[in-house]
Amino acid sequence: MRAYKKIFLGVWCVLIGFLIFACLIADKYTVPVMMYHNVADSAVFREDTVSLANFERQLKFLVSRGYNVITLQELVDGIKSGRKFKHNCVAITFDDGMKNNFTAAYPLLKKYNFTANFFISPGTVGDQNSMTWDDVQTMRANGMTFGSHGMIQAYLPSVSTQEKTYEIYESKRILEEKLKEQIYFYAYPVGGFNDEAIAMLKQAGYSAAFTTNRGTDRLNKDIFEINRIRFGDKDQSSLVLTAKLSGYYNLFRKLKKSH
């Protein structure tokens, strides 16, 4: 009987502890922003690459769990207005503008009726293994959106003011010229940023900027250092995907310095 009571009390303590923990983090939900680079089959493991099969598995997971894929514009507008997002929202982003984004990722995004934002660098469009402007236009005509990843993906904290100006202003100008629309979002190459870069982005007319797991804002309230979550071939189990897409992942992962 005593053993039964101990078990009973133990279960109640766990439940009460869980409820207290849930209450403490309830208002700390952030919309998970998924980040990809390459969607390709590779003979060796690469941190920046997810296989075609695993990418589709992750998209199927979003479908099976009823996730609502929103645009970056919806995300940023919601953050600025203080919107309480439903806990099934997610945004999808790609960096670097690799050719496989068009040949492999884009068809699957269309298959599942998802949108995604592609951060590309005008200075590398058309290079070997990169998307062409025709690829970009095709994707744009079918619901995909685009942002700047700098002209040649320079690490902003390490370059001069003149080079920052080139990366930030010129990439925006060319993208707007090619796409015939305003470019509002910037993804920091390697996630690095500093105060000068943020000031330039604001002056250039960007509305928000995206990093990796850098900075000090775990709740993504600062729209010029929105943290994203990398996805790759390691992310296969439902448990891992659930954790990363929970909206609370930022609370527990290690943040790096911004530069």
Image (cartoon, grey):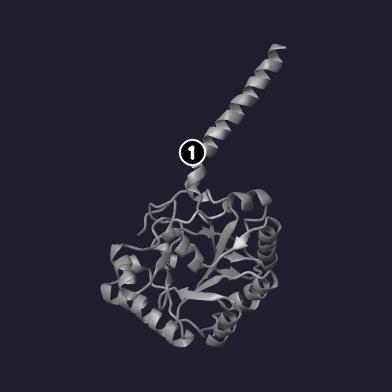
**Could you say which quadrant of the image residue 223 lies in?**
bottom left
Q: Amino acid at mark 1?
A: Leu
**Secondary structure of the residue carrying numbered label 1:** helix
Residue 57 position (above or below residue 106): above
Which of the image's four quarters has the N terminus?
A: top right
Residue positioned 43% across, 71% down in the render? 185
Residue 180 position (above or below residue 219): below
Instruction: Choose between 14 and 158: the one closer to the eye.
Output: 14
Residue positioned 59% across, 49% down in the render? 243
Find disc 1 in the rendering and name its residue: 24
Q: Is residue 226 visible?
A: no
Residue positioned 29% across, 67% down in the render? 199
Q: Is residue 189 visible?
A: yes
**Could you say which quadrant of the image residue 94 lies in?**
bottom right
Residue 178 position (above or below residue 111): below
* x and y percentages locating residue 71 in the rendered image: 53, 68
